[in-house]
Image (cartoon, rainbow, N blue to C red):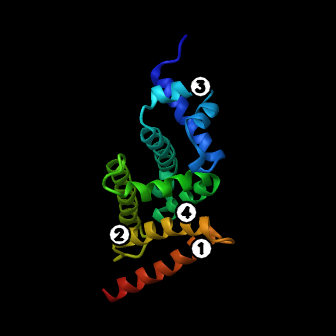
Amino acid sequence: MPESDVDLRARIVRGAADAYRATDFHQVGPAEVAAHAGVTVDEVRRAFPSWDLLVVAVVDRWSNGGRRATWSVAERHGAVAYLRARLEDGQREPGLVRLRIALLSAASAPGHPASGWFRHQYTKSFEDVALALVRDVVAGRETRGTSPRHAAEQLVALFEGLQLQAMLLDGTDLLAGWDRAVARMRAGWAGAAVTA
């Protein structure tokens, strides 16, 4: 039975993700994707006439898949544990973290074809963290009086910044850095709650 267009696209997206895992993202093109997907270059180009659409599909599959897989951590243990679990996922997938960070920078330009999609995804991720922090305050996991929105700004900035540092600075211990910084932030949140 011939492969459907939907199945072919899914296979190509999986192959592209494997290519980005195996090779620096600047070196991945249609030939590398085709080799990892077990299809021809023409099939890659036919399924994804725009390279940007394929890259968006890869990032969507990885980012949203990781978010869905770890959201239960947020529900059981809170926003801090959720983002730490996402950092652990990223340590297992460094090629895809590099791709995502590079694309966030590129897609911040209003003229980039995927700018709107990336901004929407980033906003949704941020709102997920803010919602988890609201629940954390209600459940007593974070200090009452903590501003969930401000805490989310700090946690997301730390999450993004530490991933970048881990890519660029030798000897960076990503998770230990996260734990230290979060402990200091929580002390600040508690202090702000007392003086408020």
Q: Nearer the viewer, mark 3 or mark 4?
A: 3
Closer to the chain start, of discs 1 and 3, is: 3
Question: In the rendered structure, which amino acid carries the disc numbered 4?
Answer: Arg
Question: How would you rate the neighbour count of disc 2 (Cα within 10 Å): few for under 14, some for 14-19, many for 20 or more?
Answer: many
Closer to the chain start, of discs 2 and 1, is: 2
- Mark 3 lies on a secondary structure that is loop
- Circles 4 and 1, Cβ within 8 Å, touching? The answer is no
Q: Position of residue 161 (x, y in %)?
A: 50, 69
Q: Where is residue 110, by image quadrant?
A: bottom left
Per the model, the C-alpha gap separating discs 4 and 1 is: 11 Å
Question: In the rendered structure, which amino acid carries the disc numbered 3?
Answer: Val
* Residue holding disc 3: 39
Q: Pick whichever, 173 or 140, lies toward us.
A: 173
Q: Pick whichever, 126 or 136, lies toward us.
A: 126
Q: Pick whichever, 73 or 69, lies toward us.
A: 69
* Residue holding disc 1: 177
Question: In the rendered structure, which amino acid carries the disc numbered 1?
Answer: Gly
* Residue holding disc 2: 148
Q: Tell me what residue is drawn at x 42 percent, y 39 percent.
A: 53
Closer to the chain start, of discs 2 and 3, is: 3
* Residue holding disc 4: 84
- Mark 2 lies on a secondary structure that is helix
Q: Position of residue 27 (x, y in %)?
A: 60, 47
Per the model, the C-alpha gap separating discs 2 and 1 is: 22 Å
Q: Position of residue 40 (x, y in %)?
A: 58, 25
Closer to the chain start, of discs 4 and 2, is: 4
- Circles 1 and 3, Cβ within 8 Å, touching? The answer is no
Q: Tell me what residue is drawn at x 33 percent, y 69 percent.
A: 149
Q: Tell me what residue is drawn at x 41 percent, y 76 percent.
A: 143
Per the rendering, the mark at residue 83 is none
Q: In the displayed structure, would residue 191 be above or below residue 78?
A: below
- Mark 1 lies on a secondary structure that is helix
